[in-house]
Amino acid sequence: MKNSTNNITKLILLHPNIQKQGSSNRLWLIALISCLTLAFLVILIYTRESISITVTNVAASSTTPSVNPPLSESIVKALLHYSSNSNNTEQMPYPDLKSISDVLGQCPSPCNFLVFGLTYEFLLWKALNHNGRTVFIDENRYYAAYMEEKHPEIEVYDVQYTTKISEMKEIIASVREQVHNECRPVQNLLFSDCKLGLNDLPNQLYEMDWDVILVDGPRGYWPEAPGRMSAIFTAGVLARSKKGGNGKTHIFVHDFNREVDSVSSDEFLCRENLVKSKDLLGHFVLERMDENSFQRLKALHIK
């Protein structure tokens, strides 16, 4: 019985069918392992390539500045056309719009555009300077807040003016006396004690290199109105205190036919910097000045 049992055991262990099944299982296992290994290698190679492409794109985007292309000429013409053909009696005429638009179109990208006055054309200025920064300064805090809420894409700040048109002669005479002290043409307006210097704007605005400045506010229709003396003086200081860029700032003064605007421009922007004057618009180009040198402001005989 013992020998018989051993023989049976040997027969079972050495049966050909059992050996065939074992070989087949090993082949399937080897095939499965091979497939998994191949899949792992494919995933590894694909992942490495994806990471390499991502890193390359990030590096390229960090070294190459993103610049929006300028508006096409047809779009600019359409914007100017519809902005100058509405029924609003306070709108700026087409020739004035065109003059400012041309300068914005030639402005280095990105262009920094400062506008005194939240006027009818504010959305036009934002659109024409679509690849730059456009900042609006208005005297009415409630109107500024309302328009910013209604148009969240615009950047508006309010400022309090302390001048009166009826005091223009006295104010200009006072500034002339302080031209080498508080009312210097080159200074940090944040720490200015000059009555005409606006020093309550956000700090970041004084650090900006403004390429174009438009003075189209505040109001100036009656003797007690603030007029644009402070806006024009501040624009001149910002332009002369410019640190970077090409060293030049284009300043446009709207309603240039008014006495207060014309006299203040001649006094603080200087007549020799006037490149064009037609109807309601005066166009000045001011160059950066050295902090230690003062350009003598032209004294005018105000009648």
Image (cartoon, grey):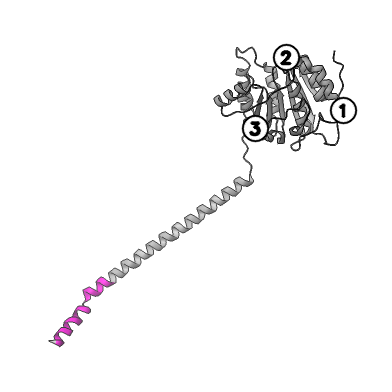
The residue lying at 63 percent from left, 31 percent from top is 70
The reply to whether discs 3 and 2 touch (Cβ–Cβ < 8 Å) is: no
Q: Magenta region: which residues?
A: 2-22
Please, is residue 209 above or below residue 100 in the view? below
Q: Element under label 1?
A: loop
Q: Say which residue label 1 marks.
A: 296
The residue lying at 73 percent from left, 27 percent from top is 198
Of the numbered discs in the image, which one, if any, rests on residue 104?
Answer: none
Circle 3 or circle 1, nearest the eye: 1
Q: Residues within 10 Å of mark 3 (few under 14, many from 20)?
A: some
Q: Residues within 10 Å of mark 1 (few under 14, many from 20)?
A: few
* Quarter of the figure that contains the C terminus: top right
Q: Identity of the amino acid at label 1?
A: Arg
The residue lying at 71 percent from left, 28 percent from top is 212
Q: Element under label 2?
A: loop
Q: CA distance from mark 1 to mark 2?
A: 30 Å
Please, is residue 85 above or below residue 74 in the view? above
The answer to if 240 sits in the magenta stretch is: no
Q: Identity of the amino acid at label 2?
A: Glu
Q: Quadrant of residue 302?
A: top right
**Residue 219: % across, % down:** 69, 17
Q: Say which residue label 2 marks.
A: 224
* Prevailing secondary structure of the magenta residues: helix
Of the numbered discs in the image, which one, if any, rests on residue 133?
Answer: 3
**Residue 17: % across, % down:** 21, 73
Q: Identity of the amino acid at label 3?
A: Arg
Circle 1 or circle 2, nearest the eye: 2
Q: CA distance from mark 3 to mark 1?
A: 32 Å
**Residue 58: % across, % down:** 57, 48
